[in-house]
Amino acid sequence: MTPPAEHRRPAGPQEPGARALLAHFAEGDPAETIHLDEVLADLEERAFGMVLFLSIPTAFIPGVAGVISGPLVMLVGVQLLFGRNEPWLPAFIGRRGPHRLAMVKFRDKLDPWLARLERVVKPRAHLLLDHPVASAFTGLNLIVLGLLLSLPIPFTNVVFALLLLLFALGLLERDGRLLAVAWTASVSAIAVFGVLSGSLASAAKHWFDMAF
């Protein structure tokens, strides 16, 4: 008997990876603003990874991370939690985005690392990306990370930014195994910086009070 075929998409042209996309968006007038709506066009479900990718530069900056990156990451997380296939952005966010100069600096810092990662990161284990339970678990992790990123917890911005990079690459490159690594690292970080420090509970209470 022939074993069932692995869950996969039909073969098609190779989609550009994170490194190629970053290089593309870094080209042009450094003073130009890259609108998120334009960036996400035609990326389909990979667009979730691109939104996370674009939230990373500000995630490294204390204060700015809580205003920009945290809410944006939570927005992505909520949509994945409820099973959206492509991200929805409010118009006032879609018309905004990073300056191209920021993307140039981001590209220059990440390019050597992305070049190494390209050797091991590849589309695989799509069940960990596409299954509703897996997608919801990714969304839940991102919601909590976004909450923690919005809080002034000392010395955590770099940790959370690197976690976002793992999630972004897993979603952009369609690599389910890398996404599983991101889950493991995220749960560990949430336990250490969130639950043990009491920050997660205070964040949840703050958002609950705002909502109700």
Image (cartoon, grey):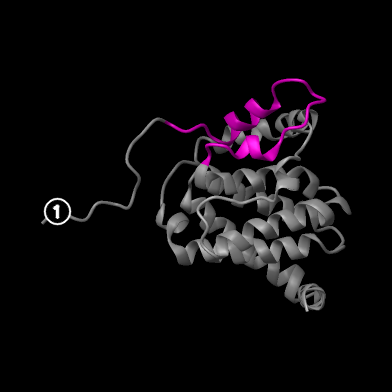
Amino acid type of the residue that numbered disc 1 sits on in the rendered structure: Thr
- The local crowd at label 1, few if under 14, some if 14 to 19, many if 20 or more residues have their Cα within 10 Å, is few
Q: Nearer the viewer, residue 49 or 6?
A: 49
Q: Quadrant of the C terminus?
A: bottom right
Can residue 61 be seen in this snapshot? yes
When asked about the image quadrant of residue 198, the answer is: bottom right
Q: Which residue is mark 1?
A: 2
For image coordinates 74% across by 33% down, the residue present is 109
Name the residue nearer the viewer: 138 or 189.
Answer: 138
Q: Residue furthest top?
A: 28
Q: Nearer the viewer, residue 161 or 37?
A: 37
User: Going 73% across and 51% down the picture, which residue do you hit?
Assistant: 161
28 vs 88: above or below: above
Does the stretch in magenta take in 21? yes
Instruction: Give the residues in magenta.
Output: 14-43
Q: Is residue 207 above or below residue 169?
A: below
- Name the element at disc 1: loop
Residue 159 visible in this rendered orientation of the protein: no
Residue 23, x across and y down, in percent: 64, 27
Q: Residue at x 72, y 33 (%)?
A: 34
Direction from residue 197 to residue 132 in the image, left or right: left
Determine whether, in the image, residue 30 is placed left or right of residue 73. Answer: right
Q: Residue at x 70, y 26 (%)?
A: 26
The quarter of the picture where residue 152 lies is bottom right
* Residue 42 within the segment the image draws in magenta: yes
